[in-house]
Image (cartoon, rainbow, N blue to C red):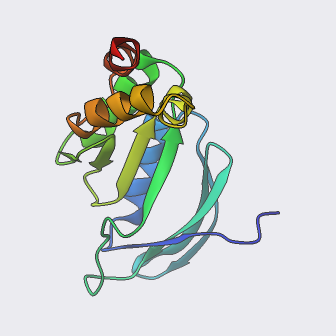
Amino acid sequence: MQKITPMLWFNGNAEEAIAFYKKVFPGTSSSNELRSGDGLITAAFNILGQDFIALNGGPQFKFSEAVSFVVSADTQEGIDNYWNQLIADGGAEGQCGWCKDKFGLSWQIVPPVLTKLLTDKDRVKAGNVMQAMLKMKKIVIADLEAAYQAA
């Protein structure tokens, strides 16, 4: 069992959010719903092995970039799939692989190769990759690899 479980505060739309995450991340499950006469209060859900709790807490608090969830995607197709679904219907692109979904939750969609290239012992090559990434919104693996090879 996970010892730390993020609780995500939604403004009355936790059920909609969980349904959205089930579409974006196949295999997402939900359980342990607590309901009142007004509807859902909390629900546990799991995305890619990570447990979360959704709370319909109201309008007092909003998500910010101070907390984001990093999703590893091995291929460009995987990056494109997560990215396009997360920014759809009111989400927003950010810089360097960051985006927000329509609920305002921040995500980072990154390929493992990014860390490999950024931590390369050849600091010129790694620097080229960093400069290329800083110009990107969605990460493009081919562009990172081209920057690495250009050194």
For this rendering, which residue is in front, 106 or 134?
134
Residue 63 in view here: yes
Quadrant location, the C terminus: top left
| Residue 122: x %, y % from top left | 51, 28
Q: Quadrant of residue 52?
A: bottom right
Quadrant location, the N terminus: bottom right
Q: Residue at x 27, y 61 (%)?
A: 104
Farthest residue, direction right: 1
Q: Is residue 97 left or right of residue 50?
A: left
For this rendering, which residue is in front, 16 or 107?
107
| Residue 141: x %, y % from top left | 39, 20
For this rendering, which residue is in front, 14 or 134?
134
| Residue 129: x %, y % from top left | 36, 29
Residue 97 against residue 13 in the figure, above or below = above
Q: Quadrant of residue 120?
A: top right
Q: Residue at x 42, y 39 (%)?
A: 109
Q: Quadrant of residue 89?
A: top left
Q: Residue at x 28, y 75 (%)?
A: 62
Residue 95 against residue 139 in the figure, above or below = below
Farthest residue, direction bottom: 60
Q: Residue at x 22, y 47 (%)?
A: 94
For this rendering, which residue is in front, 77 or 26?
77
| Residue 5: x %, y % from top left | 64, 69
Q: Is residue 140 left or right of residue 115?
A: left
